[in-house]
Image: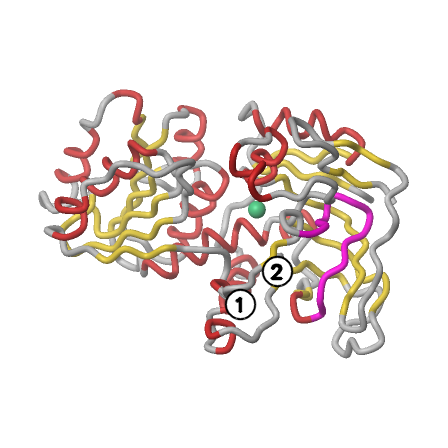
Amino acid sequence: MRALVKHHAGEGLEFVGDRPIPELGPLDVLIRVTKAGICGTDRHIWQWDDWAAGRIPVGIVTGHEFAGVVERVGPAVRLFSPGRRVSAEGHLTAGLDYNSRTGNAHIARDTKIIGIDRDGCFADYVCVPESNVWPIHESIPDEVAAAFDPLGNAVHTVMAADVSAKSVLITGVGIIGLMAVTVAKAAGAARIFCSDVDARRLKLAKELGADEAFDATEGDGWIDEIRRATRGEGADVLLEMSGAEPAFDTGFRALRNGGTAALLGLPAKSLSFDFTQHIIFKGCKVLGINGRKMWETWYQMEQLVLAGRLQLEPIITHTFPIEHYERAFETMISGEGIKVLLSMD
Ligand code: ZN
């Protein structure tokens, strides 16, 4: 089969045409991939930064966001048969640890991720356990279903922070931050503020429903603007989606006392942060957000998509055939594209 392989400990990926089709265990489902999304994580793997060098086994097939069709199933699989259109939760767990057994499998101790710890979906076929397969609703197209992984991050963050009738600040409007704008709008946020360093993304955030979009390269006067708009209090909710060190400081400064901060963005390294002012004296609630709740987030996301409450077309901007993977990555890395998909069909 065709596949994009992390072929060496350095920049880039290799396109191969003769990767063996994955072997099926008794409980596995072999899926013929139709569309796959390029994620920020894939950019780290492409660029081979410190995180990627420390985590990614050289030789794996990359990619973890996809939609496809069941090709074959293992002998013990009961719920799926060939021809079913599916996506999958890319976080795999044996299901035996504390969190898996108490409804929190997204933070299981033994989590392995497709395209990161084992072969992923930038290929004609990917193999995942039956328990991770998600049947795609007939009226949801592959392009949208292939983005359920990052969209699920946005839905999980917004739902965990409980934004209904509240003022919300989103720091960082990259792919997931932009998705969070449309999700927060759908979830009934009263006012949505955004900050970012990219003027194009800020403009799009406003088109998606943000009330104010602040350019963080122009100083931090926007924090006062948020205060003025909230009786001097600050935003009720902070959704941190940038992972950028300055955004942690400005985001918490703009959060009101007793507010809720949900953190999804990953700082590249340890950062200096004023716990005294930002958390302790502020009495705020801080939530770490990892992945998608299995499967609550997936159901919520499907409902929101089916109800037509989310604007995803402006975010899913490009699709390239897998052979044109270099242009696809360039389009994503340069910022010209937002969610960029690879097409295998
Ligand atoms: Zn992803």
User: In the visual, does 299 lie left or right of 276?
Assistant: right
Q: Which quadrant of the structure image shows residue 243?
A: top left
Q: Which quadrant of the structure image shows residue 57?
A: top right
Mark 1 or mark 2: whose residue is earlier in sequence: 2
Q: Which mark is residue 267?
A: none
The residue at the point 45 percent across, 25 percent down is: 200
**Which three-letter amino acid code belongs to the residue tagged 2?**
Glu
The residue at the point 60 percent across, 35 percent down is: 317
Cα distance between the residues tagged 1 and 2? 8 Å
- Stretch of the chain drawn in magenta: 118-130
The residue at the point 76 percent across, 29 percent down is: 324
Pointer 1: what residue? 294
The residue at the point 39 percent across, 30 percent down is: 202
User: In the visual, does 261 lie left or right of 132?
Assistant: left
Q: Secondary structure at mark 2?
A: loop
**Which three-letter amino acid code belongs to the residue tagged 1?**
Met
Q: Dot 2, crowdedness within 10 Å: few (<14), some or many (≥20)?
A: many
Rendered-image quadrant of the N terminus: top right
Viewer-side residue, 310 vs 172: 172
Which scheme is used to colour this image of the protein?
secondary structure
Percent x, y of residue 50: 52, 34
Q: Which quadrant of the structure image shows residue 46?
A: top right
Percent x, y of residue 147: 60, 49
Label 2 CB, ligand 1: below 8 Å? no
Q: Secondary structure at mark 1?
A: loop
Q: Dot 1, crowdedness within 10 Å: few (<14), some or many (≥20)?
A: some
Pointer 2: what residue? 89
Q: Are marks 1 and 2 in contact (CB under 8 Å)?
A: yes
Percent x, y of residue 259: 20, 54
Rendered-image quadrant of the C terminus: top right
